[in-house]
Image: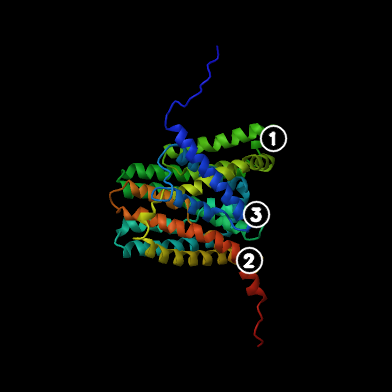
Amino acid sequence: MVRVVTSFVDPSLPQLFLEFGLLLVGLGIIARLAQRFGFSAVPFYLLAGLLMGDGGLYGIDPRGILVPTLAELGVVLLLLLLGLEYSGTQLVETARRQSRSGVIDLVLNATPGVAMALILGWGPAGALALGGVTYISSSGIVSQVVRDLRWRRNPETRPVVSILVLEDLVMAPYLPILTVVLTGAGLVSGLVSTGVALTVVAVVILIAVRREGHAQRFIKTSDPVGVLLVVFGAAVAAAGLAGLVSFSPAVAAFLVGLLLTGEVAEVARRRLDPLRELLAAVFFAYFGLSTNPADLPAVILPALVLAIITISTKFVTGWYASNTVDGGTISKLRAGALLSARGEFSVVIAGIAAVSTILPGEFQAFVAAYVLITAGIAPILARYAEPVGWWWDQRPRAKK
């Protein structure tokens, strides 16, 4: 006799499902309104999370299992699809072409965070942590905005992705080093983690370049459901394995996508895109859910000052990187706007700092405020970059 389960085993699940369902409905309405008015939905997802989280209007608890897990899967999926966009050969070529832009990006955008941490009295450890927060752009937000505004084939998109790739690769050794500094882990284990990170990245890129197209021998594109399960499963498994060895799960998912090219990558993108939309919305809302609005007033002013400075430095980075393509002022402004947002890696850095006794508790609130400001403003800047660039290019020129 087949036994049908008619009730929840965990009595808290009905409430959890109710809150999560209402969250999805709200995010769906927000997405529809944003699309109608031609904006990216990302800043509105963040605001919705802020209003519905701890200290907000409703009070959804972000510390449960469901929402944080889906948010982490959202990061994995966003970076997986970013990797699926490019082959290993393209990555190497664009990284070589943008190497100077990558150095400029590091110097211009890490320096303000280092300076602010020292001004606030957080010392060298705080400088290392906040420098990483201000340096790394949000690959997740960039990929979402590119999709929302249909900028995938724009001339500036590839230089922007090259900058993001270089930043993500820097995170591979940076995160283990930061963990050693902030948590007091052993020097030997920190060096091992860093060595493993660099080795994995180098091996995967080498395979992607030397064995491009070999994935199609093992994954049959005639079975789209099989492609969906295998590719997504491989990315999630790689992310889990990466976490076990102190490697970035997001970078691991990106590297999985990098190994897949051609028809396999195209089929995987089509199948995973709707799932990406769902989990990305949850991920961005989770930023807001995890932030208590009561913690923000004390840090909002210095966070706003730092956000203005580092948005400006990202525009300089984007302007310089876009010199390699023919897109004019519009492309340069779009590139700067895309790079302005900070997101998933900045929150990861704040999470490492949260378990440390070295930095004060206000560090996490500061990072939350900073991320919310940049992640909220960047998509709006992207929306208006094109008309501003067009106006600048068409303005009357003074006669000599």
Point 49% across, 51% down: residue: 48
Q: Position of residue 188 (x, y in %)?
A: 33, 43
The residue mark sitting in front, 3 or 1, is 3
**1 horizontally vs 120: left or right:** right
Residue under circle 3? 152
Q: How does the figure colour the protein chain or chains? A: rainbow
Q: CA distance from mark 3 to mark 1?
A: 23 Å
Residue at image location 64% in from the left, 34% down from the top:
227
Tag 3: amino acid: Arg
The reply to whether discs 2 and 3 touch (Cβ–Cβ < 8 Å) is no
Amino acid type at mark 1: Thr
**Badge 1 or badge 2: first in the primary sequence:** 1
Q: Is residue 200 visible?
A: no
Q: What secondary structure is marked by label 2?
A: helix
Q: Residues within 10 Å of mark 2 (few under 14, many from 20)?
A: some
Q: Position of residue 22 (x, y in %)?
A: 51, 42
> Real-space Cα distance between discs 2 and 3?
15 Å
| Within-10-Å neighbours for mark 3: few <14, some 14–19, many 20+ | some
- Going from N to C along the chain, the mark reached first, 3 or 1, is 3
Please state the horizontal and vertical placement of residue 283, each as a whole percent of the image.
50, 46
Give the numbered dot on residue 3.
Answer: none
How many numbered discs, if any?
3
Cα–Cα span, label 1 and label 2: 38 Å
400 and 259: which is toward the camera: 400
**Number of the front mark, 1 or 2:** 2
The N terminus, quarter of image: top right
Residue type at mark 2 is Glu
Nearer the N terminus, badge 2 or badge 3? 3
Instruction: Find residue 254 and report its image quarter.
Output: top right
Question: In this figure, which residue is indicated by the disc labeled 2?
Answer: 386
Determine which residue is flagged by label 1: 221
